[in-house]
Amino acid sequence: MDARTAAAAVCLLVLAGPALVRADIYEGRGDGGTVVFTDAPTEPGYRLVVRTDPVRVPWRQSAHRAAREAGLDPALVRAVIVVESGENPRAVSPKGAQGLMQLMPGTAEELGVLDPLRPRDNLRGGTRYLAQLVDRYDGRLDLALAAYNAGPAVVDRHNGVPPYPETRAFVRKVLDLYAQIKERSGVDTR
């Protein structure tokens, strides 16, 4: 596929569905001179080829409000949502976790969440649960996130982040994305 055809395909994706593409698209050259398209150029020399307007996602305002009500940084909650569900309010994991913040049915019930697939309910329950874990682990986000993923009993039993690859990857991804979101917003994360 030549560069013009690829650029046209990217443009069609942008126009066809804002849920598919939500960022500016840059073109650059990769190894061997191949054309590369990305929403996050990592090297100089990329040029902007498609500028997209920010997509208004109806639940984002609810996520921000739920985070603030729970005493959490909205950027942290956004990072959890992206990693947990890919921002899909209808997501259901193979293990049965549901919604934006991927609440397990038992946890959702304990939190009084009537419909885990309803974004507002899921966000209120998920942020309340995450805030409880942050308090339980004295603000240690690594432990709170590990407990969010694997359960507090597992974190307590291992006296830290458990050695499970899935949990370690989850903690790393959320913390990395959280830092990126904070960096993009101009807020110091140190």
Image: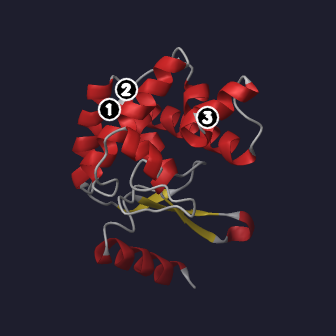
Mark 3 vs mark 2: which is more N-terminal? 2
Badges 1 and 2: C-beta atoms under 8 Å apart?
A: yes
Q: Which mark is residue 72?
A: 2
Q: CA distance from mark 3 to mark 2?
A: 16 Å
Nearer the observer, 31 or 90: 90
Q: Residue furthest top?
A: 138
Instruction: Please name which of the two marks, 3 or 2, marks the residue nearer to the observer.
Output: 3
Mark 3: which secondary structure? helix
At which x and y percent is residue 15?
29, 75
Q: Quadrant of residue 35?
A: bottom right
Mark 1 vs mark 2: which is more N-terminal? 1
At which x and y percent is residue 136?
51, 19
Residue ID at (59%, 37%): 151
Res. 102 in view: no
In the picture, the quarter occupied by the N terminus is bottom right
Residue position marked by numbered label 1 in the rendering = 67
Residue ID at (51%, 32%): 179
Residue position marked by numbered label 3 in the rendering = 146
Disc 1 residue type?
Ala
At which x and y percent is residue 187?
40, 24
Q: Which mark is residue 104?
A: none
Mark 3 vs mark 1: which is more N-terminal? 1
Disc 3 residue type?
Ala
Mark 1: which secondary structure? helix
Disc 2 residue type?
Leu
CA neighbours of label 3 inside 10 A, class few (<14), some (14 to 19), many (20+)? many
Residue ID at (54%, 37%): 148
